[in-house]
Image: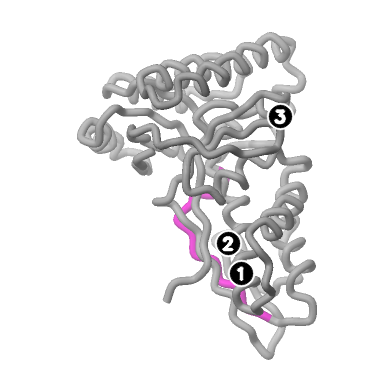
């Protein structure tokens, strides 16, 4: 049986700078999903996720988004919520946004609440704010989209397929979103680097559809994120290995200080060959 679900995302360019008014471009990762089974029960509500299993009212603070959705949507209903996910947590791939979206869709379906997708997204936006402070909305918009998107000033615009292949490699180091945001805000280079990142984002928007130029922009973005201290030796090494394997460009994706890298490849065969060379890491490939 198929349950309501949501997919992961990868940011091509624009992480961090999107919080300072820059546009961003991100793509859905349909091969990485989370599905949620919402089953009514006569007993107290419970939840089963990768990070917690027990009574819903005992959820730890890091599940603030799920708690908010439960409070807003369940009312007096008692349910068993079972999350099944292939999205690694804390990897910069939008696991919290996808979790909120899949849960809201599942509860809406189970109780025939009649919420449309826009209403669900508005509620999930509040859940994301509960998790991250004031979220940009980029993760949620991409996790809800079937196409690449341009995200600018809180609004997402669909983009055509790039007709390239994205290799996602997980470093095994969990990203540290709040620490990364704080690091950027305190960096003496913040203004000048953000201005450069904004230029890269605009260049990527203008060149979208030309994979080679998009790849070059990704590599520029990684160098700028490194200047802000957001990369790690392991992330840098993976980026270098992607480039050695023939990538058009490569960079960290997400908040940084851990998480994933992405490499852009012109054709599937080259991307698959590169993926085989990363047998020492978890990796996924997506046509974008």
Q: Circle 3 sits in a helix, a strand or a loop, which is it?
A: helix
Location of residue 87 in the rendering, given as x and y in whole percent from the top left corner: 48, 52
- Tell me the distance, in whole angstroms, between the alpha carbons under discs 1 and 3: 33 Å
Q: Earlier in the sequence, mark 2 or mark 3?
A: 3
Residue shown at 45% from the left, 20% from the top: 207
Residue shown at 74% from the left, 74% from the top: 74
Location of residue 283 in the rendering, given as x and y in whole percent from the top left corner: 36, 42
Q: Quadrant of the N terminus?
A: bottom left
Residue shown at 74% from the left, 28% from the top: 182
Residue shown at 67% from the left, 56% from the top: 118
Q: Which residues are magenta?
A: 79-90
- The residue lying toward the viewer, choosing from 259 and 164, is 164
Residue that mark 2 sits on: 102
Q: Quadrant of residue 170?
A: top left
Q: Is residue 5 left or right of residue 213?
A: right
Location of residue 36 in the rendering, given as x and y in whole percent from the top left corner: 55, 68
Instruction: Report the mark closest to the observer, 1 or 3.
Output: 3
Q: Quadrant of the C terminus?
A: top left
- Tell me the distance, in whole angstroms, between the alpha carbons under discs 2 and 3: 25 Å
What is the crowding at mark 3: few (fewer than 14 residues within 10 Å), some, or many (at least 20)? Answer: some
- The residue lying toward the viewer, choosing from 92 and 25, is 25
Residue that mark 3 sits on: 19
Q: Circle 1 sits in a helix, a strand or a loop, which is it?
A: strand
Residue that mark 1 sits on: 53
Location of residue 184 in the rendering, given as x and y in whole percent from the top left corner: 70, 22
């Amino acid at each position: 049986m198929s349950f309501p679900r949501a997919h992961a995302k990868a940011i091509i360019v624009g992480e961090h700078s999107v919080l300072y008014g820059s546009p961003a471009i991100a793509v859905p990762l349909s091969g990485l999903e989370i599905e949620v089974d919402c089953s009514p029960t006569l007993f107290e509500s419970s939840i089963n996720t990768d990070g917690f299993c027990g009574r819903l009212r005992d959820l730890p603070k890091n599940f603030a988004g799920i708690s908010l959705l439960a409070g807003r949507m369940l009312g007096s209903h008692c349910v068993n919520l079972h999350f099944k996910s292939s999205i690694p947590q804390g990897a910069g791939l939008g696991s919290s946004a996808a979790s909120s979206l899949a849960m809201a869709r599942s509860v809406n379906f189970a109780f025939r609440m009649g919420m449309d997708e826009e209403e669900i997204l508005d509620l999930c936006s509040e859940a994301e704010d509960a998790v991250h402070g004031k979220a940009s909305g980029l993760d949620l918009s991409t996790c809800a989209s079937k196409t690449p998107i341009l995200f600018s000033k809180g609004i997402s615009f669909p983009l055509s397929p790039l007709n390239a292949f994205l290799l996602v490699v997980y470093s095994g180091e969990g990203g540290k979103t709040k620490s990364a945001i704080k690091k950027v805000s305190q960096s003496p280079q913040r203004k000048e680097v953000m201005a450069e990142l904004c230029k890269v984002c605009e260049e990527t928007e203008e060149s979208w559809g030309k994979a080679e130029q998009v790849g070059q922009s990704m590599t520029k973005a990684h160098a700028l994120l490194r200047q802000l201290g957001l990369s790690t030796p392991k992330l840098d090494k993976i980026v270098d290995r992607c480039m050695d394997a023939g990538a058009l460009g490569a960079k960290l994706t997400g908040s940084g200080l851990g998480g994933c890298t992405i490499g852009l490849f012109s054709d599937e065969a080259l991307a698959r060959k590169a993926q085989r060379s990363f047998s020492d890491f978890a990796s996924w490939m997506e046509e974008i």
